[in-house]
Every structure is written in C-alpha cells, then in structure tokens.
C-alpha cells in the first residue's frame, strides 16, 4: 500500500509482510526524465492512495472462496459484461472486474488518458486484494492492460498474479490497430448492451463513444517501444478459430513478453465467444488444462 499524508509515505511490499516509512523529500529530476521507465516510476510514486472501490467491482464472492479472478474488459466495455460469467464459475473462485472511468457507475468521470495510466492505477488498487492467490484475465484490449498491470505490480513490489490469461488479444509489440471489422463492432455493441447507463450511441459514455476512445488509446500504446519489457508471470494465450480481428501468427509473440512459461490454446468461436458462450473459456481458465 502507498499512502501519502502528514509529510510521510507508507509503502507495502509483497503480501503486506514488510513495511517501511520515510519522510517525504523533494525529488531532483531523474538522470533522464525522457526515459520511459524513469517516468513510470515517478508516476507510480505520484499515484499514492487509490481506493480499490474506484476500480474493482465484486461480481461473485462465494463464502469460502480460495482463489480470485481479476478481469479487464475489451475496448468499449465495462465491468458489467462479466456478470454473465457468474453462473459458470466454481464456488472456489471470487470474481472481480475492473471498471474503467467513463463507464457504467463511473460515467461522470473523465475517460482514461492512456493504457498505462489504467494499468498503473489498477496495480495500486490490487494491493488491497493480496489475501489469496489471484489470476488476471484480459480480453482484446484488456489483454495489454492486463499485461501492463502485471508490470506495474512488479514495480510496486506487491503480490502479483499466479497467471496472466490473455484472450483474443495480440501482444504489445505486435498490435495491429485499425478499424475493427463491422461484425466485431456489432458484437462489441451487443456485448455492452445493458451495461452502460447511456444507451444513445455516440453520446458521451455510450458504447460507441467508449469504443472510439479506447481504439485511440490502443493506437497511442502501439506507438510505444515495448520490445524490452516483460513480466515474471506465466502467460496463457487463448485464441478463437473464427476470430477475424486477430493475427494468429502475431499472438505467438506473447512468449517473448514473459520470463516464465507461455501456453497457447485455440477454442471454438469468434472474437466475443468468451461472452456469448463463456463456458469453454471459463473451463480453460479454471482447469489449468
């Protein structure tokens, strides 16, 4: 946990076992303020306390659950889309979904300004959920947000996930950002139906406006040099047989983004089958097969 107050910083480390305190001092500019990693560390220290309730929504919390799943939505989506997973989840799993600003119950907030700003704040919030093992699942755009969340968690020194699962998403260094196919846009709107309070397409906070904004974030992220980044988390890559928006050759590059094992699985269905037919995807995640 990072808390700022009364001239002090408190910083928590992995699973809350170690704490240290130091008096706030004025920071001299880093040796190279333009260096991406230096900027990331400075931004992390500036985030301080992030209430977990701002970013995480509990959708399924059975008594006696021993593991936790953290889900990050696709471009244009909100946390509510994962509520349709609940009937398929085993009782041992708790489900938390990330809520992006400008969506559903955060409609009045400004939308995020970058992929990394989302990931950075989610990583800070996750420090309050280190009482049990967890995995992170990202779908489509959520895949790179999940990957960056793992990176920032490692920078903070807090408990990271047991596994990173990416579905229907290309790796950071192989993103092909452009207009989604017409069918995929339609499926995105259908999947988001009923989860946003503004149903008028094109209005601020509508699925259409959120999708357009998120595609801009992806385009900005694709312009970053991420070839030297990696995580110390096993990665599970899920692709779908009839997904027109994913380059099946590109997804193989996920193995270069982890220092651990990387496993690939192809499932029946298309880009949004993990929502229209969630059973197979959930079975793959929970079985470890």
Image (cartoon, grey):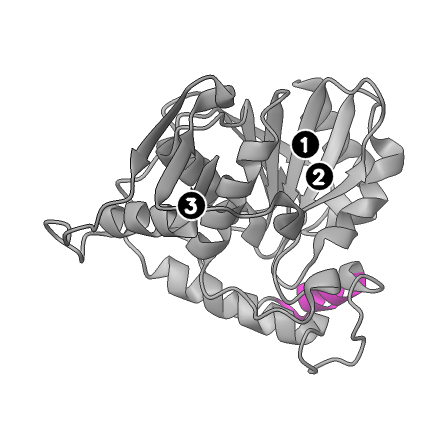
Q: Residues within 10 Å of mark 1 (few under 14, many from 20)?
A: some
Task: Please provide percent x and percent y for residue 38.
Answer: 23, 47
Task: Please provide percent x and percent y for residue 185.
Answer: 68, 68
Question: Which comes sooner in the sequence, label 2 or label 3?
Answer: 3
Disc 3 to disc 1, C-alpha distance = 29 Å
89 displayed left or right of 49: right
Question: Which comes sooner in the sequence, label 3 or label 1?
Answer: 3
For the record, the magenta segment spans 181-190
For disc 1, the marked residue is 69
Task: Assess whether mark 1 and mark 2 are in contact (beta carbons under 8 angstroms).
Answer: yes
In depth, the one of 100 and 276 nearer the eye is 100
For disc 2, the marked residue is 96
Task: Assess whether mark 3 and mark 2 are in contact (beta carbons under 8 angstroms).
Answer: no
Q: Residues within 10 Å of mark 2 (few under 14, many from 20)?
A: many
Q: Quadrant location of residue 125?
A: top right
In depth, the one of 38 and 285 nearer the eye is 38
* Residue 194 position (above or below residue 79): below
Task: Please provide percent x and percent y for residue 6.
Answer: 40, 46
Disc 2 to disc 1, C-alpha distance = 6 Å
For disc 3, the marked residue is 4
């Amino acid at each position: 946990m990072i808390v700022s107050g009364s001239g002090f910083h408190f910083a928590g480390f992995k699973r809350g076992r170690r704490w240290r305190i130091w008096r706030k001092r004025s920071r001299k500019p880093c040796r190279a303020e333009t260096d991406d990693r230096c900027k990331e560390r400075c931004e992390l220290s500036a985030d301080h306390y992030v209430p977990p309730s701002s970013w995480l929504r509990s959708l399924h919390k059975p008594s006696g659950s021993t593991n936790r799943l953290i889900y990050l939505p696709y471009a244009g989506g909100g946390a509510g889309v994962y509520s349709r997973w609940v009937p398929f989840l085993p009782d041992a799993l708790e489900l938390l979904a990330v809520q992006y600003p400008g969506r559903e119950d955060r409609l009045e907030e400004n939308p995020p300004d970058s992929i990394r700003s989302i990931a950075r704040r989610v990583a800070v919030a996750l420090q309050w959920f280190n009482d049990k093992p967890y995995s992170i699942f990202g779908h489509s755009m959520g895949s790179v947000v999940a990957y960056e969340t793992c990176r920032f968690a490692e920078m903070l020194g807090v408990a990271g996930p047991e596994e990173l699962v990416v579905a229907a998403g290309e790796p950071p260094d192989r993103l092909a950002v452009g207009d989604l196919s017409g069918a995929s846009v339609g499926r995105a709107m259908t999947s988001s139906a009923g989860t946003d309070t503004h149903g008028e397409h094109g209005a601020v906070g509508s699925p259409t406006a959120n999708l357009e904004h998120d595609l801009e974030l992806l385009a900005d992220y694709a312009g970053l040099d991420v070839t030297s980044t990696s995580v110390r988390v096993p990665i599970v890559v899920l692709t779908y047989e009839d997904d027109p928006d994913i380059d099946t050759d590109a997804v193989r590059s996920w193995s270069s983004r982890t220092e651990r094992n990387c496993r690939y699985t192809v499932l029946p269905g298309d880009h949004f089958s993990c929502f229209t037919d969630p059973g197979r995807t959930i079975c793959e995640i929970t079985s470890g097969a």
